[in-house]
């Protein structure tokens, strides 16, 4: 089972997403009420995927993405927001976000994006392992 961290300063949004991710996707969830608590959780919990709000008072989603990039954290991040635009989407992806969703997307789509992000991360890690295992002495 995978562990998804939901980061939003609005408790009702976090709780709704956590409930639906467990019910529809079978995912375990953690919740953080802001960017700083999310970064603190990433240091101690083996999170498989993160759903990150962009608009938060302490550290916004862009700042969280930038800090994750600076620290070399490779957790796939799905950014979600109520005020999306193409420019914000591009900025989030450039900072390392896997996907960008509107908060009003159906939960089935959110679950599918989480599943896709998890599959992508597994493939990324497998490629890294295969490259490491192949080394320089491999006929491949």
Image (cartoon, rainbow, N blue to C red):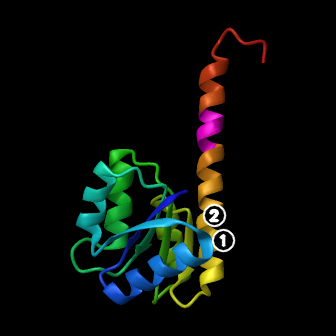
- Please tell me which residue is depicted at 53% across the width and 57% down the height of the picture: 2
Q: Tell me how far mark 1 sits from mark 2, CA to CA.
A: 5 Å
Measured as percent of width and height from the top left, residue 13 is found at 40, 86
- Eyeballing the image, is 16 above or below 43? below
- Eyeballing the image, is 57 above or below 121? below
Measured as percent of width and height from the top left, residue 82 is found at 46, 89
Corner quadrant of residue 58: bottom left
Provide the secondary structure element on which disc 2 rests: helix
Pick the quarter of the image with the C terminus: top right
Which disc is residue 112 wearing? 1
Measured as percent of width and height from the top left, residue 40 is found at 25, 57
Measured as percent of width and height from the top left, residue 131 is found at 64, 27
Q: Is residue 62 magenta?
A: no
Q: Tell me the chief SS of the magenta region.
A: helix
Of 74 and 91, the residue lying toward us? 74
Of 55 and 38, the residue lying toward us? 38
Residue found at the very far top of the displayed protein: 137
Q: What residue sits right under mark 2 in the picture? A: 115
Which disc is residue 58 wearing? none
Tell me if label 1 and label 2 are in contact, CB under 8 Å.
yes
Corner quadrant of residue 139: top right
- Please tell me which residue is depicted at 56% across the width and 77% down the height of the picture: 23
- Mark 2 neighbour class, 10 Å CA radius: few under 14, some 14 to 19, many 20 or more: some
Q: Which residues are magenta?
A: 124-128
Apparent side of residue 34 relative to residue 89 in the rendered image (left or right): left
Of 2 and 68, the residue lying toward us? 2
């Amino acid at each position: 089972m995978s562990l998804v961290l939901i980061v939003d300063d609005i408790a009702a949004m976090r709780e709704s997403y956590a409930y639906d991710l467990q019910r529809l996707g079978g995912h375990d969830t953690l919740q953080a009420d802001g960017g700083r608590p999310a970064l603190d959780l990433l240091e101690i919990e083996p999170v498989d995927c993160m759903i990150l709000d962009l608009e938060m008072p302490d550290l916004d989603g862009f700042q969280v993405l930038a800090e994750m990039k600076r620290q070399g954290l490779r957790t796939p991040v799905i950014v979600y927001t109520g005020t999306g635009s193409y420019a914000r989407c591009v900025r989030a992806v450039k900072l390392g976000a896997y996907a960008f969703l509107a908060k009003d997307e159906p939960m089935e789509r959110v679950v599918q994006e989480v599943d896709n992000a998890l599959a992508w991360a597994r493939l990324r890690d497998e490629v890294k392992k295969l490259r490491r295992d192949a080394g320089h002495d491999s006929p491949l």
